[in-house]
Image (cartoon, rainbow, N blue to C red):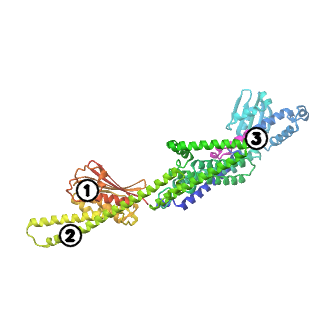
Amino acid sequence: MTDRKRYATLVKAILFGLQGFFAVGLAVFVILLQSCINQNMLNLGDLSNSSFVDSGYFEKTFNRQTSNVLEYLQLRMRFETNGEYDPQRAEKAGASEEEINLYKKYFNQYENGSSNLYYWLGTESGECMYTNLDAREGEEAALEDARELGKYLYYDSTTFYFESNVGGMEKSYYRNMREYNSLQKENIQLIIGVDTNFSYSDDFSVAKMEFDKLYPWAKLSVMYIIIFGAGWLFCLCYLSVAAGRRREDRQIHLYRFDRIKTEVVCAIMVIGMSFIMQLAMRVHGQDYSTSGRMIVAGTLAFLADVIFMGLYLCLVRKVKSESFWENSVVNWCVTGLQAFLKERYMSGKLLGYFILLTAASLTLGYLAFARGFVWAYVLIAVLIICVFVFLAKWIGSRRRILEGIRHITDGELEYKLNLEEFSMNGTEQELAEGINHIAEGLSKAIHESVRDERMKANMITNVSHDLKTPLTAIINYVGLLKREKIENENAVRYIEVLEQKALRLKSLMEDLVEVSKISSGNITLHMDEIDFVELVRQTGGEYNEKMEQKDLNVISKFPNEPMMIWADGRQLWRVIGNLYNNAGKYAMPNTRVYAEIEKADGWVIFTMKNISEDFVSLPAAELTERFVRGDTARTTEGSGLGLSIAKTLTELMGGRFEISMDADLFCAEVKFRLIR
């Protein structure tokens, strides 16, 4: 029952909704992480590094500030005289108002002692040209100060020597230098240092505050993306396994929507997902806030998940029911073409009708629409009416044939199709006549089968009843003779033999009656949940004495936990008892008998193995037939009906009964579906 409960509709509905929740959460946190990366320039590599000065975010900020410093130094060379701003020189250099404002902005940013960035620009001899350090010191002292600040950059254009402890700066620096040709032409030495204590409020300190604020959210987003992604995949796997299954049985069930052609389902999925993707791209191009983007992304993710899962599970059910190819347009076309080519007579006739109808339609269409003949319009109308009437009659004939087949399949074998209704169509009339003959043949065969089975059952019952009275009298008189004090030992031995044969005949009669009941279906099974392990253990215990009489060592290998199956306890005891009884009869003395229960692929399998005392020449498949015995000489007890009854009872209870032989090793398997 536990396996069936896993496929309950409520469980699948809950997991379907939970998967939609996971899809929404996944989309929301992906947008949040993207916002942290794109809008605030946070690198994915920063997620494993919580230090701002070692992050890619700091590298971007340092690179941007280096570009600003280079631009500022170029403006100073153009606008300043002896380190002071010279309006006349700026005017002579043709400076625009925008460039002058930019110069003033950089001056206020770097020269007022409120910046965490320090620069030093000198000649190739080491003399200072421009700097915002407190003292106009030389190259070596400036480089030492920059190193003490924490992060620095040093470049000598004369020797092309570059040094920096900021990752990835050399490539970025040369790219920036190409934009400022005047600095590149000079033989200069440039030193830039950043105070990593961030004592002043500038772009570096603002970037650090943004990093400290965004880092926890970005790391949390990655964690939730992994969690929601794993949850979504788990729900996908479960729903794939449970698709088409119900708790009441193990069949694959299809819904009405699953009858749609496979290609149509795939086309709907592609169109639906493409529409969602196109809508998402349009929304991505809009100027939404982060919260707005998260709401829209969650909504679109939920819609995409519902569309995808609904159509995906439809395809899964098609695959499980083996209708993926059968219910496809391609298969329909292929089978139609094969049938068309196979039926040469019908194919030629149909092809002729098609060519004739096509030629008539094209001719009348040309005469009506191109030449404007009124009578052509009339003929087109007549042609359409004729085709409509033909199709209506053809559909009506098919409907009546299907209705007749439905009546016959429902058991109304006396139902007949009226052949006069199909007189206008020879093929349909032939088909209707064939269906009538089939119904007559089925009715006759069923009546004969029922009569034969009734005769067999009556014969067995009558013979058993006729033999029961004298056999009972024989057994009773044998009992009376045993009570007499007969001194003749031969007579006593004869009485014992007579009793054994009479009891054997009684057992044979009971088996015959039982076989008659089972084969005719005149037996009632009381199905219930049975602990297979416990039933086998108890049944085997009842045959211990019989096994010990032949010195048989029974080696049992049973699991400790219960294994529940759906069976009739009384009839199942009879099946298992028959196997133990046969082992006690036909196994070689002083050998081992192996009894084992195992679970495999949803089945509980009971296996019994023993070495046969006599050589068995018959195939294993024949041992389960009626009146067939391994002892072909029939010198031992038995009727040859035990294994046949056991197999029939097992199959009636929904199980499987299999016999196999490997030389003298006899092996019997009884299998039932495990319900919990």
Looking at the rendered structure, the secondary structure element under dot 3 is strand
Q: Is residue 195 left or right of residue 416?
A: right
Q: Where is residue 154 in the image (x, y as percent from the top left)?
A: 72, 33
Q: Which of 133 and 201 is in front in this view?
A: 201
Q: How crowded is mark 1: few (under 14 residues within 10 Å), some or many (20 or more)?
A: some
| Mark carried by residue 553 | 1
Per the image, the residue denoted by label 3 is: 117
Quarter holding residue 550? bottom left
- For label 2, the residue is 470
Question: Which badge, 2 or 1, is on the more N-terminal residue?
Answer: 2
Name the one closer to the observer, 597 or 511: 511
Q: In this view, does 83 lie above or below 555?
A: above
In front of the other: 301 or 278: 278
Closer to the observer: label 2 or label 1? 2
| Residue 598 location, quadrant | bottom left
Disc 1 residue type?
Answer: Asn
Could you tell me which secondary element the residue under label 2 belongs to? Answer: helix
Residue type, numbered disc 2:
Pro
Left or right of 247, for residue 188: right
User: What is the CA distance from the residue labelled 2 to the residue labelled 1?
Assistant: 41 Å
Residue 183 seen in the current view: yes
Quick one: label 2, few (<14), some, or many (20+) residues within 10 Å?
few
Q: Specify the farthest residue to the left.
A: 488
- Name of the residue lying farthest toward the front: 375
State the image coordinates of residue 363 (x, y, percent, origin top left): 67, 41
Left or right of residue 439: residue 57: right
Mark 3: amino acid: Leu
In the structure shown, which secondary structural element does the residue marked by tag 1 occupy? strand
Q: Give the range drawn in magenta.
A: 43-65
Mark 3 crowdedness (10 Å alpha carbons): few <14, some 14-19, many ≥20: many
Q: Which of marks 3 and 2 is in front?
A: 2
Above or below 183: residue 671: below
